[in-house]
Protein backbone atom coordinates (compact mmCIF):
# COMPACT_ATOMS: atom_id res chain seq x y z
CA UNK A 1 0.00 0.00 0.00
CA UNK A 2 1.26 3.47 -0.89
CA UNK A 3 1.98 5.34 2.35
CA UNK A 4 -0.11 8.28 1.07
CA UNK A 5 -3.13 5.95 0.76
CA UNK A 6 -2.89 4.64 4.33
CA UNK A 7 -6.06 5.55 6.30
CA UNK A 8 -4.04 7.22 9.06
CA UNK A 9 -2.20 9.41 6.57
CA UNK A 10 -5.40 10.30 4.72
CA UNK A 11 -7.13 11.20 7.99
CA UNK A 12 -4.20 13.37 9.05
CA UNK A 13 -4.21 15.13 5.68
CA UNK A 14 -7.93 15.93 5.95
CA UNK A 15 -7.51 17.05 9.57
CA UNK A 16 -4.72 19.38 8.50
CA UNK A 17 -6.94 20.84 5.78
CA UNK A 18 -9.70 21.55 8.30
CA UNK A 19 -7.29 22.67 11.02
CA UNK A 20 -5.95 25.79 9.30
CA UNK A 21 -7.94 28.69 10.88
CA UNK A 22 -8.86 30.46 7.62
CA UNK A 23 -10.01 27.22 6.02
CA UNK A 24 -11.96 26.31 9.15
CA UNK A 25 -13.81 29.64 9.01
CA UNK A 26 -14.68 28.97 5.36
CA UNK A 27 -15.98 25.49 6.14
CA UNK A 28 -18.10 26.61 9.07
CA UNK A 29 -19.55 29.43 7.00
CA UNK A 30 -20.85 26.74 4.62
CA UNK A 31 -22.49 24.72 7.39
CA UNK A 32 -25.86 26.41 6.78
CA UNK A 33 -26.17 24.53 3.47
CA UNK A 34 -25.81 27.62 1.30
CA UNK A 35 -23.19 28.26 -1.35
CA UNK A 36 -20.77 31.18 -1.42
CA UNK A 37 -18.23 32.67 -3.78
CA UNK A 38 -14.49 32.75 -3.25
CA UNK A 39 -14.70 36.48 -2.57
CA UNK A 40 -17.32 36.01 0.14
CA UNK A 41 -15.42 33.16 1.77
CA UNK A 42 -12.20 35.16 1.62
CA UNK A 43 -13.92 38.02 3.44
CA UNK A 44 -15.25 35.64 6.09
CA UNK A 45 -11.80 34.07 6.51
CA UNK A 46 -10.13 37.51 6.51
CA UNK A 47 -7.64 36.60 3.79
CA UNK A 48 -6.79 38.08 0.40
CA UNK A 49 -8.56 36.85 -2.76
CA UNK A 50 -5.44 35.00 -3.94
CA UNK A 51 -4.99 33.29 -0.56
CA UNK A 52 -8.70 32.39 -0.48
CA UNK A 53 -8.32 30.74 -3.89
CA UNK A 54 -5.40 28.64 -2.66
CA UNK A 55 -7.30 27.57 0.47
CA UNK A 56 -10.35 26.59 -1.58
CA UNK A 57 -8.23 24.55 -3.99
CA UNK A 58 -6.95 22.59 -0.98
CA UNK A 59 -10.49 22.02 0.35
CA UNK A 60 -11.70 20.88 -3.07
CA UNK A 61 -8.70 18.55 -3.45
CA UNK A 62 -9.47 16.93 -0.08
CA UNK A 63 -13.12 16.51 -1.15
CA UNK A 64 -14.37 18.67 1.70
CA UNK A 65 -15.89 21.27 -0.62
CA UNK A 66 -17.65 21.09 -3.99
CA UNK A 67 -17.64 23.85 -6.59
CA UNK A 68 -20.39 24.70 -9.06
CA UNK A 69 -19.93 27.11 -11.96
CA UNK A 70 -22.87 29.36 -12.79
CA UNK A 71 -22.23 32.02 -15.41
CA UNK A 72 -18.98 33.75 -14.52
CA UNK A 73 -19.19 32.81 -10.85
CA UNK A 74 -17.89 29.79 -8.97
CA UNK A 75 -19.94 28.82 -5.93
CA UNK A 76 -18.55 26.64 -3.14
CA UNK A 77 -20.53 24.36 -0.81
CA UNK A 78 -19.82 21.52 1.62
CA UNK A 79 -19.40 18.19 -0.13
CA UNK A 80 -22.19 16.27 1.54
CA UNK A 81 -23.62 15.40 4.94
CA UNK A 82 -20.55 13.42 6.03
CA UNK A 83 -18.40 16.56 5.93
CA UNK A 84 -21.06 18.52 7.81
CA UNK A 85 -21.25 15.80 10.50
CA UNK A 86 -17.47 15.92 11.04
CA UNK A 87 -17.53 19.70 11.37
CA UNK A 88 -20.50 19.54 13.74
CA UNK A 89 -18.66 17.03 15.91
CA UNK A 90 -15.63 19.31 16.08
CA UNK A 91 -17.92 22.19 16.91
CA UNK A 92 -19.36 20.25 19.86
CA UNK A 93 -15.87 19.45 21.12
CA UNK A 94 -14.89 23.11 20.79
CA UNK A 95 -18.06 24.19 22.61
CA UNK A 96 -18.70 26.98 20.14
CA UNK A 97 -21.63 28.18 18.05
CA UNK A 98 -21.64 29.42 14.47
CA UNK A 99 -23.16 32.46 12.82
CA UNK A 100 -26.28 32.06 10.73
CA UNK A 101 -26.79 33.31 7.19
CA UNK A 102 -28.94 36.48 7.07
CA UNK A 103 -30.17 37.41 3.56
CA UNK A 104 -30.42 41.13 2.77
CA UNK A 105 -32.78 40.76 -0.22
CA UNK A 106 -36.07 42.74 0.12
CA UNK A 107 -38.93 40.49 1.31
CA UNK A 108 -41.05 40.90 -1.82
CA UNK A 109 -38.18 39.63 -4.02
CA UNK A 110 -36.85 37.05 -1.60
CA UNK A 111 -40.25 35.35 -1.28
CA UNK A 112 -40.80 34.62 -4.98
CA UNK A 113 -39.56 36.14 -8.23
CA UNK A 114 -38.65 35.21 -11.76
CA UNK A 115 -35.15 34.06 -12.70
CA UNK A 116 -35.17 34.38 -16.50
CA UNK A 117 -38.11 32.09 -17.33
CA UNK A 118 -38.38 30.06 -14.12
CA UNK A 119 -39.27 30.69 -10.49
CA UNK A 120 -36.78 31.73 -7.82
CA UNK A 121 -36.86 32.80 -4.19
CA UNK A 122 -37.74 31.10 -0.91
CA UNK A 123 -40.84 29.43 -2.36
CA UNK A 124 -38.91 28.06 -5.35
CA UNK A 125 -36.11 26.68 -3.17
CA UNK A 126 -38.65 24.91 -0.95
CA UNK A 127 -40.39 23.54 -4.05
CA UNK A 128 -37.05 22.24 -5.35
CA UNK A 129 -36.45 20.35 -2.10
CA UNK A 130 -39.96 18.89 -2.11
CA UNK A 131 -39.72 17.67 -5.73
CA UNK A 132 -36.60 15.72 -4.80
CA UNK A 133 -38.12 14.42 -1.55
CA UNK A 134 -41.27 13.29 -3.35
CA UNK A 135 -39.22 11.42 -5.94
CA UNK A 136 -40.46 13.51 -8.88
CA UNK A 137 -36.88 14.49 -9.70
CA UNK A 138 -33.72 12.39 -9.41
CA UNK A 139 -30.16 13.69 -9.20
CA UNK A 140 -27.99 12.70 -12.18
CA UNK A 141 -24.86 14.70 -11.32
CA UNK A 142 -24.12 16.33 -8.00
CA UNK A 143 -21.32 18.50 -9.36
CA UNK A 144 -23.48 19.97 -12.15
CA UNK A 145 -26.79 19.56 -10.26
CA UNK A 146 -28.37 17.95 -13.31
CA UNK A 147 -31.76 16.30 -12.73
CA UNK A 148 -34.03 13.87 -14.51
CA UNK A 149 -37.79 13.38 -14.11
CA UNK A 150 -38.76 9.98 -12.73
CA UNK A 151 -41.73 7.98 -14.08
CA UNK A 152 -43.61 8.97 -10.91
CA UNK A 153 -42.70 12.59 -11.56
CA UNK A 154 -43.81 12.46 -15.19
CA UNK A 155 -47.31 11.40 -14.10
CA UNK A 156 -47.40 14.08 -11.42
CA UNK A 157 -46.25 16.79 -13.83
CA UNK A 158 -48.88 15.65 -16.32
CA UNK A 159 -51.54 16.32 -13.68
CA UNK A 160 -50.27 19.93 -13.68
CA UNK A 161 -50.63 20.13 -17.46
CA UNK A 162 -46.89 19.79 -18.07
CA UNK A 163 -45.78 17.58 -20.99
CA UNK A 164 -42.38 16.18 -19.99
CA UNK A 165 -41.78 14.64 -23.43
CA UNK A 166 -42.20 18.08 -24.98
CA UNK A 167 -39.84 19.60 -22.40
CA UNK A 168 -37.21 16.98 -23.27
CA UNK A 169 -37.45 17.84 -26.96
CA UNK A 170 -36.46 21.48 -26.44
CA UNK A 171 -32.92 22.51 -27.33
CA UNK A 172 -31.96 23.60 -23.85
CA UNK A 173 -30.98 22.10 -20.49
CA UNK A 174 -33.76 19.86 -19.29
CA UNK A 175 -33.66 20.28 -15.50
CA UNK A 176 -30.91 21.52 -13.19
CA UNK A 177 -30.32 23.20 -9.86
CA UNK A 178 -29.99 26.94 -10.51
CA UNK A 179 -28.33 28.61 -7.52
CA UNK A 180 -30.68 31.12 -5.93
CA UNK A 181 -28.92 34.44 -5.29
CA UNK A 182 -30.95 35.33 -2.19
CA UNK A 183 -31.14 31.87 -0.58
CA UNK A 184 -27.79 30.51 -1.86
CA UNK A 185 -29.47 27.14 -2.39
CA UNK A 186 -30.79 25.71 -5.67
CA UNK A 187 -34.18 26.11 -7.29
CA UNK A 188 -35.30 24.24 -10.44
CA UNK A 189 -34.10 25.74 -13.71
CA UNK A 190 -34.18 24.60 -17.32
CA UNK A 191 -37.15 23.43 -19.38
CA UNK A 192 -38.81 21.84 -16.35
CA UNK A 193 -38.43 25.00 -14.27
CA UNK A 194 -39.91 27.10 -17.07
CA UNK A 195 -42.82 24.69 -17.49
CA UNK A 196 -43.55 24.82 -13.75
CA UNK A 197 -43.66 28.63 -13.68
CA UNK A 198 -45.85 28.69 -16.80
CA UNK A 199 -48.27 26.25 -15.16
CA UNK A 200 -48.35 28.23 -11.91
CA UNK A 201 -49.13 31.46 -13.78
CA UNK A 202 -51.77 29.77 -15.93
CA UNK A 203 -53.49 28.35 -12.85
CA UNK A 204 -53.05 31.69 -11.04
CA UNK A 205 -51.21 30.07 -8.17
CA UNK A 206 -48.74 32.93 -8.60
CA UNK A 207 -49.18 36.33 -10.20
CA UNK A 208 -46.53 38.50 -11.86
CA UNK A 209 -45.74 42.01 -10.64
CA UNK A 210 -46.26 44.45 -13.52
CA UNK A 211 -43.00 46.35 -13.12
CA UNK A 212 -40.54 44.05 -11.35
CA UNK A 213 -39.46 40.41 -11.19
CA UNK A 214 -41.51 39.82 -8.04
CA UNK A 215 -44.13 37.06 -7.98
CA UNK A 216 -47.00 36.89 -5.50
CA UNK A 217 -48.39 33.61 -4.20
CA UNK A 218 -52.18 33.62 -4.22
CA UNK A 219 -54.20 32.01 -1.45
CA UNK A 220 -55.10 29.23 -3.91
CA UNK A 221 -51.42 28.84 -4.72
CA UNK A 222 -50.46 28.41 -1.08
CA UNK A 223 -53.18 25.77 -0.65
CA UNK A 224 -52.06 23.88 -3.76
CA UNK A 225 -48.36 24.02 -2.86
CA UNK A 226 -49.20 22.42 0.48
CA UNK A 227 -51.65 19.85 -0.93
CA UNK A 228 -49.61 18.79 -3.98
CA UNK A 229 -46.02 19.26 -2.87
CA UNK A 230 -46.18 19.32 0.93
CA UNK A 231 -44.63 22.80 0.83
CA UNK A 232 -46.08 24.86 3.70
CA UNK A 233 -44.27 28.07 2.65
CA UNK A 234 -44.42 29.13 6.29
CA UNK A 235 -41.15 31.05 5.92
CA UNK A 236 -42.28 32.93 2.81
CA UNK A 237 -42.82 36.57 3.81
CA UNK A 238 -44.31 38.65 1.01
CA UNK A 239 -44.45 41.93 2.93
CA UNK A 240 -44.43 44.53 0.14
CA UNK A 241 -41.83 47.23 -0.05
CA UNK A 242 -43.19 50.73 0.62
CA UNK A 243 -42.50 53.35 -2.02
CA UNK A 244 -42.70 57.12 -1.50
CA UNK A 245 -45.73 58.86 -2.96
CA UNK A 246 -45.23 60.43 -6.38
CA UNK A 247 -44.19 64.06 -6.19
CA UNK A 248 -43.72 66.98 -8.51
CA UNK A 249 -40.15 65.80 -8.88
CA UNK A 250 -41.46 62.81 -10.75
CA UNK A 251 -40.43 59.92 -8.49
CA UNK A 252 -40.78 56.63 -10.34
CA UNK A 253 -40.62 53.09 -9.03
CA UNK A 254 -37.72 51.14 -10.50
CA UNK A 255 -38.10 47.57 -11.73
CA UNK A 256 -36.32 44.76 -9.93
Image (cartoon, rainbow, N blue to C red):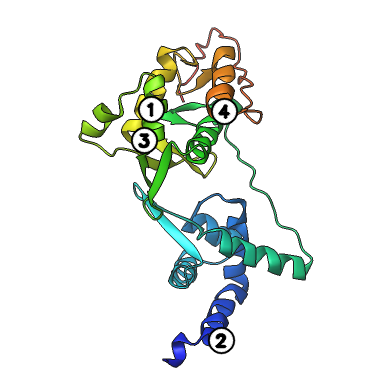
Q: Quadrant of residue 17?
A: bottom right
Which of 197 and 138 lies nearest the eye of the viewer? 138
Mark toward the viewer: 2 or 4: 2
The residue that mark 3 highlights is 151
Query: Disc 4 and disc 1: Cα gap in Å?
Result: 28 Å
Residue 105 in the image: above or below residue 210? below
Q: Is residue 209 left or right of residue 219?
A: left
Q: Secondary structure at mark 1?
A: helix
For the point 41% across and 23% down, the residue is: 197
227 sits left or right of 170 in the view: right
Q: Residue at x 51, y 67 (%)?
A: 64
Res 117 visible: no
Q: Which mark is residue 155?
A: 1
Report the Cα–Cα distance between label 1 and label 3.
Answer: 7 Å
**Residue at the spot x=48%, y=40% of the render?**
132
Find out whether the residues at labels 1 and 3 contact each other: C-beta distance under 8 Å.
yes
Q: Mark 2 or 3 closer to N-term? A: 2
In the picture of the structure, the residue carrying the numbered disc 4 is: 111
**Measured along the vertical axis of the image, is residue 150 above or below residue 228?**
below
Secondary structure at numbered mark 3:
helix
Cα gap from disc 1 to disc 2, whole angstroms: 49 Å
| Residue picked out by circle 2 | 8
Q: Residues within 10 Å of mark 2 (few under 14, many from 20)?
A: few
Q: Earlier in the sequence, mark 1 or mark 2?
A: 2
Contact flag, marks 2 and 3 (Cβ < 8 Å)? no
Q: Position of residue 54 (x, y in %)?
A: 45, 71
Residue 196 visible, this orientation: yes
Amino acid sequence: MNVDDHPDVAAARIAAAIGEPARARMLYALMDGRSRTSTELGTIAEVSPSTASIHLQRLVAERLVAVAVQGRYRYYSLRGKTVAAVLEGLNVLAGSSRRTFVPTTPNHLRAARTCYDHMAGTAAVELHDRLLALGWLSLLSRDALEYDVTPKGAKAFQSLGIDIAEARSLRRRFAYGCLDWSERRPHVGGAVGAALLSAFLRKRWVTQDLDSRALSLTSAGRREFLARFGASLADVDETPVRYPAASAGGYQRKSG
